[in-house]
């Protein structure tokens, strides 16, 4: 069961990243509702709190996307951020200190991501929202209460 929850967490982060890319960092309320509907069709249960955290993460990803959208390696950057976020949160189990945060940033820089103060702030928003999502059970309806 724990492995399934981790997989769901990973899938949710990756779906969010793909949504931001596909929308080119711009969407309206209807696109947001469609995104939520598609996630629920994939078997995710999204409480109101989870929708709020997911929305916060998307907004941070959107800001990050906009700040690096002129980069020719945009898809690799967004994929790298998603992968590093998933790995970092799972490794730390959603709890880290400042040294852990600096390690996260250095790992992204090793991947070739040039970070400004602005993009670092956006990454912080992505990471904090992802941490909140990590703490919720995000598997399908049939897994609740088990």
Image: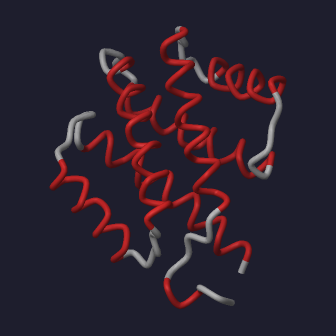
- Count of all numbered marks drawn on residues in the image: 0
Q: Quadrant of the C terminus?
A: bottom right
Looking at the image, residue 92 lies above or below residue 145: above
Looking at the image, residue 29 lies above or below residue 117: below
Whole-percent x, y for residue 145 in the image: 65, 88
Residue 96 located left or right of residue 115: right
Whole-percent x, y for residue 1 in the image: 71, 81
Residue 111 located left or right of residue 119: right
Residue occupying the far top of the picture: 116
Residue occupying the far front of the picture: 48
Kindly identify the residue that appears in the image at 71 percent across and 19 percent down: 106
Residue 60 located left or right of residue 101: left
Kindly identify the residue that appears in the image at 62 percent across and 41 percent down: 85
Residue 108 lies in quadrant: top right
Looking at the image, residue 83 lies above or below residue 37: above
Kindly identify the residue that appears in the image at 55 percent across and 13 percent down: 115
Kindly identify the residue that appears in the image at 40 percent across and 43 percent down: 58
Whole-percent x, y for residue 9 in the image: 58, 61
Colour pattern: secondary structure
């Amino acid at each position: 069961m724990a492995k399934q929850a981790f997989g769901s967490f990973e899938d949710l982060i990756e779906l969010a990243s793909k949504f931001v890319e596909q929308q080119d960092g711009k969407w309206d309320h209807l696109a947001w509702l469609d995104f939520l509907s598609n996630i629920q069709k994939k078997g995710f249960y999204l409480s109101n709190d989870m929708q709020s955290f997911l929305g916060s993460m998307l907004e941070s990803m959107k800001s990050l996307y906009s700040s690096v959208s002129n980069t020719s390696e945009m898809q690799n950057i967004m994929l790298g951020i998603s992968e590093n976020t998933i790995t970092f949160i799972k490794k730390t189990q959603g709890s880290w200190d400042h040294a852990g945060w600096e390690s996260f940033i250095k790992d992204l820089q090793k991947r070739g991501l040039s970070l400004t103060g602005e993009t670092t702030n956006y990454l912080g928003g992505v990471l904090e929202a992802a941490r909140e999502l990590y703490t919720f059970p995000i598997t399908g309806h049939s897994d609740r209460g088990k």
